[in-house]
Amino acid sequence: MIILHVVGARPNFMKAAPVMAALGARGVSQMLVHTGQHYDAAMSEVFFHELGLPAPDLNLNVGSATHSVQTAEVMMRLEPVLLERRPEWVLVYGDVNSTVAAALVCAKLRIRVAHVEAGLRSFDRTMPEEINRMLTDQIADLLLTPSEDGDANLLREGIAPSRIRRVGNVMIDTLLRLLPAAERRWPEVRRRFVTTRFSLLTLHRPSNVDDPQKLMRVLGTLAGSSRELPVIFPIHPRTREALRSARAEVPEAIVLTEPLGYLDFVALQRHATAVVTDSGGIQEETTVLGVPCLTLRANTERPVTVSMGTNTLVGDDLDRLRDELRGIAGGGGKRGSVPPLWDGRAAERVADALLAAGGE
Ligand code: UD1
């Protein structure tokens, strides 16, 4: 049996790593295809080293383009690979353009495809990722969900229960495995940023960064809070590009850095007083680390991080952001608890589910 994994963008890598390890431990032959959606060393290469992912067997080098072109390029370049290799299963991860593109190629070729992180819904169709999630789940053969809400969403969309397996959160497998290594990085990371109390900021959603005035208002609010909590901001290439084309500068009070590797970023999350983000995965990681997270979105496809975890949705209410930050700086903020099956063993359950379904 050959299992082929398709990854493309930064948040895919930490999900594929534990699944590849669990399948490898069970003696399964595997192949890794990188679509090249993310191509900068800081967005891709560094993660392969740190996560212990094997070098991709193939890179499709699709690069950046409009969503349609990027999706189409992945499809066109992946189809001949799948026709040649004919894997028993293809695994796709998360909700990026590469995920839906690969799932669609598999569905057309009638190659079985499993979606890791299935069933998440923000119910906001203006998000490109929501479209990717819905379409991928409709056409995938096996839907591996991280939490109960995922199962409920899929059932509501008419998906047969026999296609759904609740496995837990594979990204948390990686977090728990590498937390000790991240902690060993902390003394050096702390020296670099010269502060012990800080908030950690990430921003890359089109809804937050593509309108420069909105982006500058968010950054202005955070700069205003930086006397109580200095802000560290590893900037995503999309956000850097948005600022450059608007000829806007990040306020000086904010400590700007290039995108960080996994270990340094986890070390910063672990030691942050607060995290401010519009990322999906960071809402989950902060919940497990017990660090209060303020999410600059009106909705989340990961509601369990709000109901059980440390996440608070602040939308684009910047007064609320300022007040919440002040509360956290003063010792407040959610502590939360860890959702079921976010236990470091999710990839084992993915591997078992695939092997059980393998002979069907
Ligand atoms: C993508 C995912 C998003 C995920 C994010 C994590 C989709 C629809 N979105 O968004 O869900 O949270 O990755 O990072 O798939 N760029 C570079 N170097 C790179 C990659 C991107 O400079 O290595 C720049 C390019 O200018 C590009 C822009 O970033 O146009 C956007 O990249 P893209 O992969 O299209 O989407 P992201 O915004 O990164």
Image (tube, helix red, strand yellow):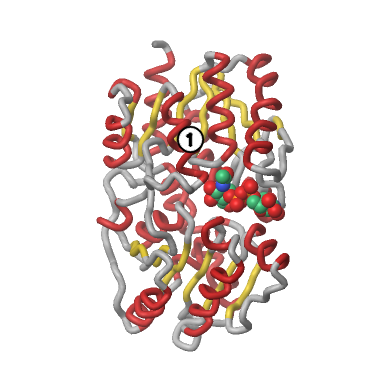
Horizontal side of residue 32 vs 270, given as left or right: right
Q: How many marks?
A: 1
Q: Is residue 198 above or below residue 360?
A: below
Q: Residue at x 35, y 76 (%)?
A: 324
Quadrant where the C terminus is found in the figure: top left
- Quick one: 231 or 324, which is closer to the camera? 324
Q: Residue at x 27, y 62 (%)?
A: 336
Horizontal side of residue 225 vs 333, given as left or right: right
Residue 202, percent across and down? 53, 64
Residue 175, percent across and down? 45, 52
Determine the image quadrant of residue 71. Answer: top right
Residue 55, percent across and down? 67, 38
Horizontal side of residue 285 vs 51, given as left or right: left
Q: Amino acid at mark 1?
A: Val
Using the rendered image of the protein, determine whether residue 57 is visible from the camera's viewpoint: yes
Q: Which residue is mark 1?
A: 19
- Please identify the residue farthest to the top as the structure is shown: 360
Q: Is residue 228 above or below residue 210?
A: below
Local SS, label 1: helix
Q: Residue at x 63, y 41 (%)?
A: 67
Q: Residue at x 59, y 36 (%)?
A: 98
Residue 56, percent across and down? 67, 35
- Please identify the residue farthest to the bottom as the structure is shown: 227
Q: Residues within 10 Å of mark 1 (few under 14, many from 20)?
A: many
Using the rendered image of the protein, determine whether residue 1 is visible from the camera's viewpoint: no
Q: Is mark 1 within 8 Å of ligand 1?
A: no
